Image (cartoon, rainbow, N blue to C red):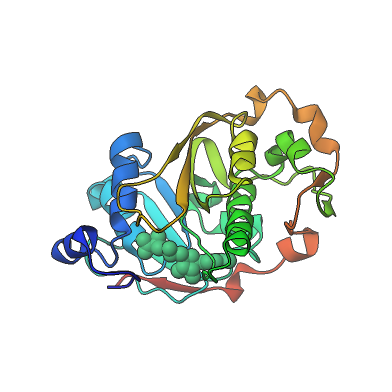
Amino acid sequence: MSGGGAPDFFYREAQRLGYVARSAFKLLQIQNQYKLIKPGCSVLDLGCAPGAWLQVACQSLGPLKNGGAVVGIDVKKVKVPSLHCDARVQTISADVMKLSKPQVMELSPKKKGFSVILSDMCPSVSGISTRDAALSFELGVRALDLAVGRAMSVSNDNFQNEGVSCTCSPYDKGVLLSRGHLVIKLLESEDTKELSQICKPLFKKSTWLRPKATRSSSREIYLICQDLKSHSSMTYLGRLEAPITVRDLTLEGPKQQAKSIRKLSIHQTE
Ligand SMILES: C[S@@+](CC[C@H](N)C(=O)[O-])C[C@H]1O[C@@H](n2cnc3c(N)ncnc32)[C@H](O)[C@@H]1O
């Protein structure tokens, strides 16, 4: 069992129920409230170590015969937990900041994309709150960029004049399927509102949640975005030809996109 802080109710419950971390209860609450993961759907879990969300995501898919898939990515090597996970779960060791969208797309069932993307990614906390929040924001923006691709430029005005300039390919498609859902963990700061402003026009609904299992000392908060609007229903496509400006965000160029997925190590349940 991983996790800092003193053992508490959620820690003990996680041990009792066979979850590898108390964070399982955060996704359980999200799933109870929003029912994002449906039987048979495809889930991408960004920052999946040590694997508690993999367990909850796999349970939420329902019986094995219903199908579905859970793909977890983490910079740390993650062994798929034996309890609550089955052959539908696989993990990949990689830095999400360095993966290209085509590489991630390759990992989805039939290479068509994912119906749910979860990002519980968190930087190693330094204790310097502004620094930690900025790094967490960067990971959150990366999750959004992977999910929706160029559509993110709809709200790029929020970022302009503050950072570096990146030009995206007009074919820069995200890996989240239309009507799909996205969950992003952030450490609260004045920037967190910006991210929800970007998400609002892209999804039918976006709300904030601070799960009961979040420790009182933590500033973490989750942005729950439901029902990605289809590209055709978005009214801003004309603007997508313009270069976008995103603070501190490295969007991959064609060279990185061409990198082979074979470089990744894939671990599957036996
Ligand atoms: C809070 S933990 C996730 C807990 C997980 N959801 C669970 O329930 O077991 C955050 C994870 O994000 C991962 N992470 C941080 N930055 C990352 C990056 N750039 N790429 C991939 N994983 C990253 C960390 O290695 C860490 O394991």
| Residue situated furthest left in the rendering | 16
Which residue is nearer to you in this view: 170 or 73? 73
For residue 3, say whether it is visible.
yes
At 27% from the left edge and 69% from the top edge, which residue is drawn? 6
In the visual, does 257 lie left or right of 185? right
Regarding residue 116, the answer to whether it shows in the image is no
| 139 and 131: which is toward the camera | 131
The residue positioned 65% from the left and 30% from the top of the image is 231
Residue 49 in the figure: left or right of residue 65 = right
Quadrant of image for the N terminus: bottom left
Drawn side of residue 91 relative to residue 132, left or right = left
Residue 156 rendering spot, x and y as whole percentages = 75, 39
Figure quadrant of residue 164: bottom right
Seen in the picture, residue 107 relative to 226 is either above or below; the reply is: below
The percent position of residue 211, horizontal first and vertical second, equals: 35, 46
Q: Which quarter of the picture shows residue 31?
A: top left
- Count up the numbered dots: 0
Quarter placement of the C terminus: bottom left
In the figure, 21 relative to 26: above or below?
Answer: below
Please determine whether, in this image, residue 221 is positioned above or below residue 5. Answer: above
Q: Is 152 rendered above or below residue 84?
A: above
Report x, y in % for residue 265. 51, 76
Percent position of residue 141, x then y: 63, 51
